[in-house]
Amino acid sequence: MRSPAWYPLRLTQQIAAGEASLADICERAARWNVAEVEFYDGLLAPVGPFAPAVVRQLFDASGVRISLLLCAPDFGTPFLAVRSKEREAAERYLDAAAQLGASAVRFTAGAQHPGIGQEDALNLAAENLTALAAMATERGLVCCVENIIRDTRWESADISAPPEAFRVLLRKLQNAPVQVLFNTGNPPLMQTDALSVLADIPEGRLYGLHLSDRAVPDGQFLTLGEGPTPWDRLKAALRERQFDGPLGVVDGQTEGDDASLRSLGFVQTWWDNRK
């Protein structure tokens, strides 16, 4: 089977708060035999403290690869000057992803803002995501969007958070080289069945899975297998699609390392037994 990557959301938040270090991620990944880690753009300069070259060197020394860079540009703002700065930052992160040795970059549509309707905001997002996808292809990267609820830096939800809005966004991106990173834990928070969101992803556009379980209605991240994600039905739907793409464990629970290991182990068992 393809071993899952690890998105250490809990440790990422601790690093941002000055309570942990990149070495904490590398040490655990190496000790747990995790070959690939997903990385959040908020830790990279100029927003965060770490230059891509330094991050790459540290992870390479630990024998751990960064497979995906998670970026959260806000293209939903009605202000052109702000959108331009978001676009410039996103382009820098494409270069950073290439420096890190990642295979893909996950971008967001943007936050909901007053003064702009959903359709107009989705058009702006699609325009910018289409341009970024072309740049990603030039760098040998896959450009992805994800059915997210809200980035931690935003005060409001993503403009594509409602399933019907995400469906519209995908339609607007149908002619762009944009793939989908499907998050398993977010649909229940939108009072939607995960499989209906999965079914909205066009054939050939499903890049990978962000495997998460989240409590309803508060959104707390849980150990995988202990929440409302319909794992058995999801497994059957993925088998029908003949999916064999990247798996990423979203590890945002607050219980600690034992729960991290339970989540990683759950995915191993779940995916091994998918046939």
Image (cartoon, grey):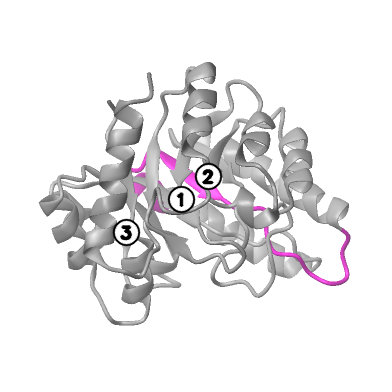
Image coordinates for residue 13, horizontal then vertical, percent:
38, 72
Q: Earlier in the sequence, mark 2 or mark 3?
A: 3
Q: Earlier in the sequence, mark 3 or mark 1?
A: 3
| Front residue of 224 and 166 | 224
Question: On the rendered image, what quadrant is the C terminus found in?
Answer: top left
Label 1 near label 2: C-beta < 8 Å? yes
- The answer, for residue 37, to whether it is visible in the render is no
Question: On the rendered image, what quadrant is the N terminus found in?
Answer: top left
- Mark 3 residue type: Pro
Q: Secondary structure at mark 2?
A: loop
- Mark 2 residue type: Thr
Q: Quadrant of residue 130?
A: top right
Query: Would you name the residue on which mark 1 appears?
Result: 212
Image coordinates for residue 239, horizontal then vertical, percent:
48, 20
Within-10-Å neighbours for mark 2: few <14, some 14–19, many 20+:
many
Name which residue lies at 31% across and 65% down.
51
- The answer, for residue 47, to whether it is visible in the render is yes
* Magenta-tinted stretch: 96-117
Label 3 near label 2: C-beta < 8 Å? no
> Residue 80: which disc?
none
* Drawn side of residue 59 relative to residue 116, left or right: left
Q: Secondary structure at mark 1?
A: loop
> Separation of disc 3 and disc 1 at Cα?
27 Å
Name which residue lies at 78% across and 44% down.
164
> Residue 52: which disc?
3
* Drawn side of residue 89 relative to residue 226, left or right: right
Image coordinates for residue 266, horizontal then vertical, percent:
31, 43
Tell whether position 193 is magenta. no
Image coordinates for residue 48, horizontal then vertical, percent:
40, 72
Q: Secondary structure at mark 3?
A: helix
Query: Would you name the residue on which mark 2 appears?
Result: 184
